[in-house]
Image (cartoon, helix red, strand yellow):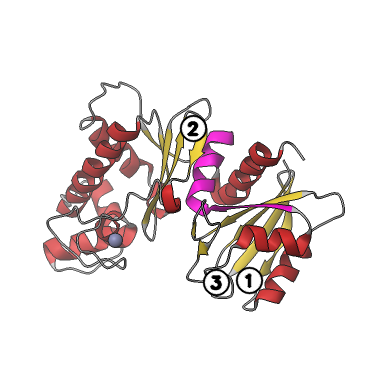
Amino acid sequence: MGLSFDIGGSRIRAARGGQALGEVTTPAEVGAFVAAIAGFLTPQDRALAISIAGVVDPGTQAIKVANIPCIDGRRLAPDLAAALGRRVLVLNDADCFVLAEVAQGAARGHRNVFGIILGSGVGGGLVIDGRLVQGAGGFAGEWGHGPVIRAPALACGCGQTGCLDTVGSARGLERLHEHLTGEIIGSVEVIRRWRGGRPMPAVNLWLDLVAGQLAMVVNVVGASVVPVGGGLSNDRALIAALDRAVRARILRRLDQPLVVVAEAGPDAGLIGAAYAGEVEFGAA
Ligand SMILES: [Zn+2]
């Protein structure tokens, strides 16, 4: 595997051949940002692949990355390629997440994969017939937004009301518990009580809302596995319950697990970007 980067709002991590090279704080100014990337390059590196916490438009190459203002709106891949004299690929982090699961995680051997993130928000990435689908504008796999939840209909950061993102994330589970009981507690405590056998209507409602939307996506895209990452995937019992709820709602009859805990771990961005770089540029 070649050189890959995982770029977030607070830090830039780098790896070559699957080995970590280190990390630096994400610079606030574009010249320092380019220099930070260049600092990891050797003369042998002919290409680099980047996972970034933002939307990448595959048509224009422009990226939308709100928490790194110095590169927000720029055509990052061509700009970096010109500045560094290397070939550059930039992908959304959810896309890298699903590619990491295909490369060496829970989706090995699967051709059609819908990878989902249930963390601070609800996100996803789509692989069809073994290839990443970015889609028009780069939004393919973004199943968290759209006004589909009737009750509780909550305002979403995207400007709409009733997005799955408002109830399906860890924070969403807390919102559901507050909506049903008036009590404000963390998602970890909600799940702990549920695992302890206490009736937790918020978890039942969460399972119904998330499984309903996910079943529809599975029917549409034909996924044979759905790896789950993000904070809520740390609870295997919750993901097993989600798996049962989704399989009860899809058209296909399936006796094996469909919704499974992701395996690539915290390096998924680096692994997925490196895998995408190999596909794009050939083995470095
Ligand atoms: Zn939304």
The amino acid on which the numbered mark 3 sits, given as a three-letter code, is Ile
Examine the image and state in which quarter residue 177 appears. bottom left
Q: Along the polypeptide, which appears first: circle 1 or circle 3?
A: 1
Counting other residues with Cα less than 10 Å from the Cα at mark 2, is it few (<14), some (14-19), or many (20 or more)?
many
* Nearest to the observer: residue 47 or residue 171: 47
Residue matched to label 2:
107
Residue 144 located left or right of residue 28: left
Q: Is residue 229 visible?
A: no
Give the distance between the C-alpha atoms of the residues marked 1 and 3, in whole angstroms. Answer: 8 Å
Mark 1 touches mark 3? (CB < 8 Å): yes
The spot of residue 27 in percent (x, y) is 65, 75
**Numbered tag placed on residue 26 in the rendering:** 1
32 shown above or below 13? below
* Picture quadrant where residue 183 is located: bottom left
Quadrant in the picture for residue 78: bottom right
Residue 68's tag is 3
Judged from the image, the secondary structure of the residue bearing numbered disc 2 is loop
**Would residue 275 appear left or right of 188 to someone viewing this image?**
right
